Image (cartoon, rainbow, N blue to C red):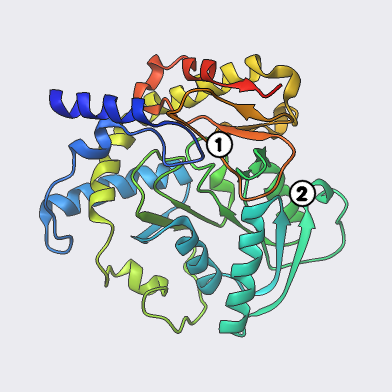
């Protein structure tokens, strides 16, 4: 294990990440991985059940399925299996636009979706009369370093007589109130600090849509008819045991960021996500090992993400932020 610790220390020094995920490399990402074959493997099944139990608590949902793939894979599964009727997308940035495009694809695939609309997140209080079947939102929008409190999204969904679905890859574990949603989907590699390769769909009531796909049909995922993300699940078991310790590193980094770049902040406290921060100036670094986040939108400013010291857990003090400065 000493060699593994030294290897991880070396890797994290070679790449100092201020990106939206995956997080810095953690010993637990690798130490729990072993040969496994999924179905019929008693050791793996025990690990799988442990991880699912933790995911249920984190998401506040009663049912969890997982599959190999990215967070976008999970989003498409949500759209095909759950969405129907009138759909409203809360527009927050690049990733909410992805929700819109995935919903358009689902509408072409099955006849359950009747219409798709958008509403800017700043206008949630202005829409009072129109009713929808589903509201779909991204509570932490990393492309703009923006947070929409889930409780506000839930109030809006109630007002429009809608169910609420969340793209929670960047918010799960880090923000509260995911339990208020009807469906929550996310990947393993951002808010959960895990390896890439696993995606989760969490819900309370089973979907009723008929899905003409073997891979994307949630019934087949429930029955584990495909090989799951075995090694990612194995790594998550140990990470989730120490999750609050790792999360403290993000809290400490966020706190230091808000203090160090206070006069450059774009949003008020209510709209500050734990995972990242949007400032209105260009952030640069002279350190060749620093990897800065490049949002998929052209923005006036920079988004700095706070997953670069996750491996340090509660010992992290946000010292890597000393490597950043405003471009003057």
Image x and y of residue 108, in percent: 61, 83
Image x and y of residue 81, in percent: 50, 72
Read off the residue under disc 2: 121
Q: Nearer the viewer, residue 102 or 166?
A: 102
Closer to the eye: label 2 or 1: 2
Give the quarter of the figure containing the C terminus.
top right
Q: Quadrant of residue 299?
A: top right
Image x and y of residue 316, in percent: 42, 17
Q: Nearer the viewer, residue 61 or 244?
A: 244
| Element type at mark 1 | loop
Question: On screen, 250 above or below 54?
Answer: above
- What residue appears at the point 63 percent right and 68 percent down from the top-left corner? 101
- What residue appears at the point 27 percent right and 72 percent down from the top-left corner? 225
Query: Can residue 1 be seen here?
Result: no
Read off the residue under disc 1: 175
- What residue appears at the point 46 percent right and 40 percent down from the top-left corner? 191
In this image, 107 relative to 252: left or right? right
Image x and y of residue 212, in percent: 45, 84
């Amino acid at each position: 294990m000493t060699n593994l610790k030294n290897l991880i220390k070396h890797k994290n020094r070679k790449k100092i990440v201020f990106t939206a995920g995956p997080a810095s490399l953690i010993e637990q990402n690798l130490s729990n991985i072993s040969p496994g074959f999924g179905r019929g493997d008693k050791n793996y099944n025990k690990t799988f059940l442990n991880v699912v139990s933790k995911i249920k608590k984190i998401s506040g949902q009663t049912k969890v399925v997982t599959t190999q793939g990215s967070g976008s894979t999970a989003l498409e599964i949500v759209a095909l299996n759950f969405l129907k009727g009138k759909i409203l997308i809360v527009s927050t940035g690049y990733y909410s636009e992805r929700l819109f495009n995935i919903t358009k694809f689902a509408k072409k695939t099955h006849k359950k979706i009747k219409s798709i609309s958008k509403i800017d997140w700043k206008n949630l209080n202005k829409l009072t009369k129109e009713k929808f079947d589903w509201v779909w939102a991204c509570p932490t929008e990393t492309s703009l370093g923006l947070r929409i409190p889930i409780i506000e999204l839930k109030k809006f969904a109630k007002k429009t007589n809608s169910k609420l679905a969340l793209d929670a890859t960047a918010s799960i574990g880090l923000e509260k109130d995911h339990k208020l949603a009807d469906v929550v989907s996310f990947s393993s590699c951002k808010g959960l600090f895990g390896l890439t390769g696993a995606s989760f769909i969490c819900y309370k009531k089973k979907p009723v849509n008929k899905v003409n796909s073997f891979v994307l049909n949630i019934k087949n995922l429930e029955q584990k008819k495909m090989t799951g993300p075995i090694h990612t699940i194995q790594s998550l078991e140990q990470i989730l045991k120490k999750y609050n310790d790792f999360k403290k590193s993000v809290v400490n980094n966020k706190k230091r960021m808000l203090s160090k770049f206070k006069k450059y902040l774009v949003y008020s406290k209510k709209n500050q996500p734990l995972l990242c921060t949007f400032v209105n100036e260009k952030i640069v670094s002279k350190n060749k090992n620093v990897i800065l986040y490049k949002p998929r939108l052209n923005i006036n400013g920079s988004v700095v993400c706070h997953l670069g010291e996750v491996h340090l857990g509660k010992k992290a003090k946000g010292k890597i932020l000393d490597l950043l400065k405003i471009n003057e």
